[in-house]
Image: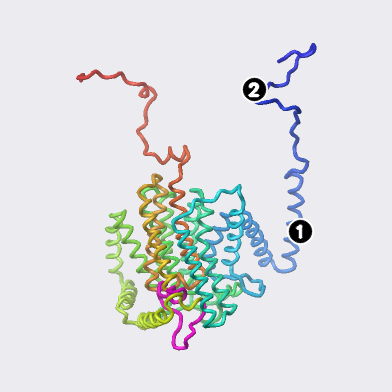
Amino acid sequence: MVPVAGRIDTSPIVIGREAPLLSLKRTSPLIGPATWLPPLAGVAAAAAGILIGRTSAVVGVILIIGAVLASAILVSDEVTLLALVATITLLPFATLPVKIGLSPTFLDVLCLVLLVRWLGRRVNPQYPPVPPTPLNGLLWIWLGIALVALLAAVGRTPLTADTMHYFAKVALATLVFFFVVDAVRTRERLRHLYLAFCCGGAGAAAIGVVLYLLHPATSTRLLNLLGILSYPTGPDVLRYRVDFNLAERAISTSVDPNVLGGLLMLSIVLTLAQLVARAPFLPRRWWALLLVPMLPCLLMTYSRSSWVGLFAAFVFMGVWRYRRLLVVGIILLALFAQLPVSQRFSRQLISGLQAKDQAAAMRLGEASDALRLITTYPAFGVGFGGSPDLNLYVGVSNIYLQMAEEVGIAGLVIFLALLAVFFLWLLYRLPRIHDPPGADIVFGLIAAAVAMVVAGMLDRYFFSFQSDIALMWWLLGMGAAAVRVAQSPLPAAAAERTAVPAPALRVHRLQPRPARRVGAR
């Protein structure tokens, strides 16, 4: 306190900086949540009541939930990515029920939202960009080759609106890689997306099992309800095997059993990787519970490419890291082979590998025709439209041949180089990750990529459908983001939890012991 003119000045003395010339008392805002929240809730309730009254309770509630989700998607990267995962797993072919010239799918809208937010961060100096990955340059080159292939095909075939729309879908789905790498910056967000995909796969599997066990007429009627979202309708929405006594195939909400098989293959690998992980970020019983519907549903799809891809990932996990997993897998496979139901699956798999059934023979013919098309248009393929020759066609059950048909050998070489860099980079960084839960996530994503690469040799869905193209780049983006996040410094509290626990010590044990003399016993 400093005396001033016969009185005591009680103003605080500021040390280390100049005192403010004028002290302003901080006042509460004139309009707080208690003021604006009740009127806003009243307006929202009135609008909801009018909407429900003019339509119906079901439609009104759906529109209200959709408006809430749309608002959350517009303001949150994580909600947008979670919605993207939910759409890929549960409604991969859904389109907006509102017609605006074209019919944008849910994936189109979500990818556009992510693109706008990503571009906004690029021009915002307050939002630091993430370090580039070794895959960025190769992916931009691949997109450039795809654009050149599209333009090169204009001289041979007319550029239609459908071709442009298909190219836009492929480009947006490919950009998912950059969206994921840019938005996944924390361990919590990485785990949320990982868990969301596994839960989405389990949900799709549960729906597929239920539809498979119901009477075909009931399943058909339930699937026709998705017609409001432009899903195929009619009496033939269910799928059956051409051979093997026309056995029904599980499709869930994925329309095609092979598309469902690819989804379940990846979700099973990611879930299994956490089940056998050294430091899972959730209790193992929850991961085991997620596997319960996925394993039988994968068998019900009769998707041989998914079975082979899952087997390849299983062998990779056992050889590279978990030796005991191979022993357990051999025992379970031997027990399953003893069951009568296993004969129908093993017979179909063996006949497919030997190309004895009709479907396998057709795929061999497709591969032969694809090689003819590739040798005719080797550099940049035929673009994203149809074949300019009447005696050739675009379409083969192999993503590598399919890619060579559409973007040529140049695009295929860049894509293969990108996959090679992905595996070499992640496998090189994996032993250098000192965060055990992060290392387990990275290893699971590598195993899932192995399954995807192997399954792509036997089917083409990862380069034919927008949802599966987005899923492929989502997986690669998750791997790239996981390596960066897992190598980032751990917070102090998290580092203590991650460290190897030491035996508990009493207080008196913390006192320093007297130094021992040399030669003393």
Query: Foreground residue, 362 or 390?
Result: 390
Residue 235: x and y in percent read 53, 82
Q: What label sits on residue 46 in the rendered view?
A: 1
Residue 252: x and y in percent read 49, 70
Q: Residue furthest right?
A: 5
Residue 375: x and y in percent read 39, 80
Can residue 344 be found in the magenta stretch?
no
Can residue 406 be found in the magenta stretch?
yes
User: Mark 2 highlights which residue?
Assistant: 15
Query: Foreground residue, 121 or 65?
Result: 121
> What residue span does the magenta drawing correspond to?
384-408
Seen at 79% across and 11% down, the residue is: 6
Seen at 41% across and 76% down, the residue is: 397
Sequence order check: which comes first, mark 2 or mark 1? 2
**The disc labelled 1 sits on which kind of residue?**
Ala
Query: Foreground residue, 477 or 152?
Result: 152
Check disc 2 and report its element: helix, strand or loop. loop
Q: Is residue 31 left or right of residue 266?
A: right
